[in-house]
Amino acid sequence: MMPEIFYVSLKHDVRTQNSGSTFNVYNFDACSLQTLQPMLRDQLLGIYTNYVVMGITVVNRIVNRSTTVDAEILTYHGLGSTVTALSFAQALEFKTTKRTLLSTSGNKKVITITQSLNFRNCLKARFWDDSDFWGTASAAPPISATANFYSYATGIYSANGSASVDCTMDRSIMFHVKFFNLAAVANSIDSPAPRLFPLEIFDTNDDDSTPENSPRPSKPKPTSVSDAGIQQKQTRKQK
């Protein structure tokens, strides 16, 4: 039986290729659960009516495929309206930026950068009670339309700022989600009619309806010697 509120982390993986000397940004937001649709999302939204994203963990694994050019890697996050359309210089000074230099090919050298954020630490108190943050099976949270929900970005740039750089990036996105409001579903098995009285077990022996372990009645014993004599006389008369 599923609980009324269910917490789970759902994972989505994507690979992107970067080629060029410009600052290429790969962006998504916390409402992307609707578009990325990680495994089990649809099944859980068949059980629950609503969800709210409580936080995100992003793991970037990047390989430089260039043979002569180093790459600059920036990862950062913030409100959607501030994360998008940043230049390299602006993104470099962003508060949440992590910067890494990825040297040329380097025999399959992989750089791993992780960004993680619990929305309890940056959004308003009890944001999960606000329906603007709720999503459904068919609609993203309304907050996504205002660009005020958190966005994540990974920027790749050639270290010398001019020559082309080629990188392959594998990105794992872990959505930490709260599902709630159980959906109404029809019973899969017909349930029997309720009993009008509790079921009890009796001894059904036709010869004797007395319960098996109950004591059987005995003849009254005389209480005194005189009573015993009277009983004997009565017995003789009857004979």
Image: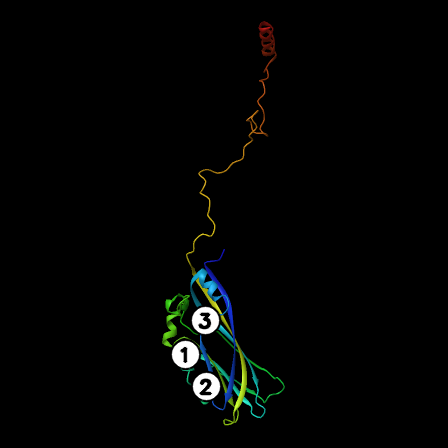
Amino acid, disc 2? Ala
Amino acid, disc 3? Leu
Q: Position of residue 171 (x, y in %)?
A: 52, 77
User: Which residue occupies 46% across, 69% down?
Assistant: 54
Query: How far apart are the two marked residues, 1 and 3, measured between alpha carbons?
Result: 15 Å
Query: How far apart are the two marked residues, 2 and 3, measured between alpha carbons?
Result: 25 Å
Point out the tag, 2 or 3, that comes first from the N-terminus: 3
User: Which residue occupies 38% across, 72% down?
Assistant: 143
Disc 2 element: helix
Looking at the picture, tell me which residue is in the foreground, 238 or 44. 44
Disc 1 element: helix
- The tally of labels here is 3
Q: Position of residue 168 (x, y in %)?
A: 54, 83
Asked whether disc 1 touches disc 3, contact meaning CB atoms under 8 Å apart, the reply is: no
**Residue indicated by mark 2:** 91
Amino acid, disc 1? Gly
Looking at the picture, tell me which residue is in the foreground, 60 or 93. 60
User: Which residue occupies 45% across, 63% down?
Assistant: 45
- Closest to the camera, between mark 2 and mark 3, is 3
Quarter location, residue 169: bottom right
**Residue indicated by mark 3:** 33
**Residue indicated by mark 1:** 80
Specify few, some or many for label 3: CA neighbours under 10 Å numbering under 14, 14-19, or 20 or more: many
Colouring scheme applied when the structure was drawn = rainbow
Left or right of 144 on screen, residue 13: right
Looking at the picture, tell me which residue is in the foreground, 224 or 214. 214
Left or right of 9 on screen, residue 133: left
Q: Position of residue 44 (x, y in %)?
A: 47, 63
Q: Position of residue 120 (x, y in %)?
A: 45, 71
Q: Which mark is residue 50?
A: none
